[in-house]
């Protein structure tokens, strides 16, 4: 848009050129192919989903007071808070514009699926924020939250692709189930990498979830299993807030992360998380087995395995 203010245009370009896996866009195109269509016809919808994902990241970074994303300053740091808010809003509008360029005959269906995705991601983020004020969050509630915050956009990607590719109801259902299981496995791997990952490869500071008292599968499972000294330590972690995290020195932070990691190891939580990831991945693969054999289906199999063995 030639009339867009320069700062807003620059900020949008900055976000969209910052890299990332482009996972959701790839899922849209591969799902279209697996359903019998082509990647090319799904390209506008793939762009829409990826742009929408970046909208959520810009606003998430504001809420999390994040200083960096993908190794570069976040938008509200590089520009300012107001520009970051407008950048996120603009990206969402651009995403809808791209979706409506898809050429799919039932544009209302695509918009309905896409809008449900946006709505559920926002609900998932709201649940995540609400969990910060509660010390009684359960593993079941955690899965409900990630199914919306992380999983819904992945499911939206696979279902949009399936619809655009002209898939039968059975194919659409299979790709929807694949996306749901893959989304859960993806978030669980993210939780795990925060504890055991390589900081340089992960692209984020290891142990951030622990230091901030974030309700992850690991922390909630550990709380269910712990007693005595270990439980008291984990309850202290649960009560931590963002401002407390920012007051820790590097040495204090490292000591806390090392101690909690040892508790997770002792309680078998790391092994339990890997087992849950494997189970969700197996579910995703079983869903794919319902699709006709194709190169796209094989690529989706490969992608699901790659994501749960990733280091970043």
Image (tube, grey):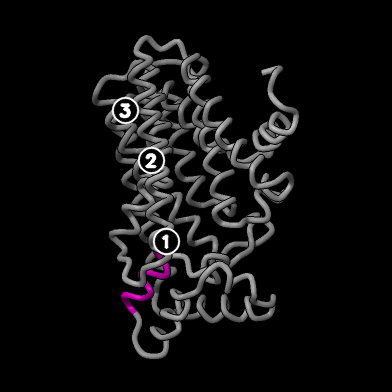
Separation of residues labelled 3 and 2 (CA atoms): 21 Å
Q: Toward the viewer: 88 or 178?
A: 88
- Residue 242 to residue 147: above or below: below
How many other residues sit within 10 Å of disc 2, few (<14), some (14-19) or many (≥20)? many
Residue 111, quarter of the rendered image: top left
Q: Is residue 224 magenta?
A: yes
Q: Residue at x 31, y 45 (%)?
A: 283
List x then y, in percent, for residue 305. 46, 45
Residue reaching furthest to the bottom: 228
Name the disc covering residue 152, or none: 2
Q: Residue at x 30, y 65 (%)?
A: 138
Per the image, the residue denoted by label 1 is 274
Residue reaching furthest to the left: 170
List x then y, in percent, for residue 122. 42, 44
Compared across the picture, whether 54 is left or right of 169 comes to: right
Compared across the picture, whether 242 is left or right of 36 comes to: right
Select label 2 or label 1 by which is in front.
Answer: 2
Q: Residue at x 38, y 36 (%)?
A: 155
Q: Looking at the magenta stretch, what is its main secondary structure?
A: helix
Q: Toward the viewer: 13 or 37?
A: 13
Compared across the picture, whether 2 is left or right of 94 comes to: right
The earlier-in-sequence mark between 3 and 2 is 2
Q: Residue at x 60, y 36 (%)?
A: 86
**Residue segment shown in magenta:** 216-225
List x then y, in percent, for residue 156. 39, 33
Residue 119, quarter of the rendered image: top left
Name the disc covering residue 291, or none: 3
């Amino acid at each position: 848009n030639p009339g867009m203010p320069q700062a807003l245009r620059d900020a949008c370009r900055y976000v969209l050129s910052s890299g990332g896996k482009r996972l959701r866009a790839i899922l849209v195109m591969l799902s279209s192919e697996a359903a019998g269509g082509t990647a090319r016809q799904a390209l506008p919808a793939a762009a829409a989903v990826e742009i929408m994902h970046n909208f959520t990241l810009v606003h998430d970074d504001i809420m999390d007071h994040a200083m960096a994303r993908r190794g570069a300053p976040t938008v509200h740091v590089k520009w300012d808070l107001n520009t970051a808010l407008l950048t996120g809003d603009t990206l969402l509008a651009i995403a809808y514009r791209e979706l409506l360029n898809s050429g799919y005959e039932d544009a209302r269906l695509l918009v309905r699926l896409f809008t449900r995705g946006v709505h559920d991601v926002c609900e998932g983020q709201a649940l995540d924020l609400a969990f910060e004020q509660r010390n009684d969050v359960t593993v079941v509630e955690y899965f409900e939250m990630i199914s919306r915050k992380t999983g819904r956009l992945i499911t939206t990607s696979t279902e949009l692709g399936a619809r655009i590719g002209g898939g039968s109801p059975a194919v659409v259902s299979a790709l929807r189930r694949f996306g749901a299981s893959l989304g859960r496995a993806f978030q669980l791997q993210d939780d795990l990498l925060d504890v055991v990952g390589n900081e340089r490869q992960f692209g984020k500071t290891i142990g951030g979830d622990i230091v901030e008292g974030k309700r992850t599968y690991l922390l909630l499972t550990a709380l269910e299993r712990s007693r005595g000294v270990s439980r008291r330590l984990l309850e202290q972690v649960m009560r931590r807030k963002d401002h407390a995290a920012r007051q820790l020195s590097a040495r204090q932070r490292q000591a806390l992360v090392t101690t909690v990691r040892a508790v997770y190891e002792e309680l078998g939580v790391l092994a339990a998380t890997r087992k849950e990831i494997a189970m969700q991945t197996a579910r995703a693969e079983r869903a794919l087995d319902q699709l006709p054999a194709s190169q796209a289906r094989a690529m989706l199999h490969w992608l699901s395995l790659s994501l749960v063995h990733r280091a970043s």
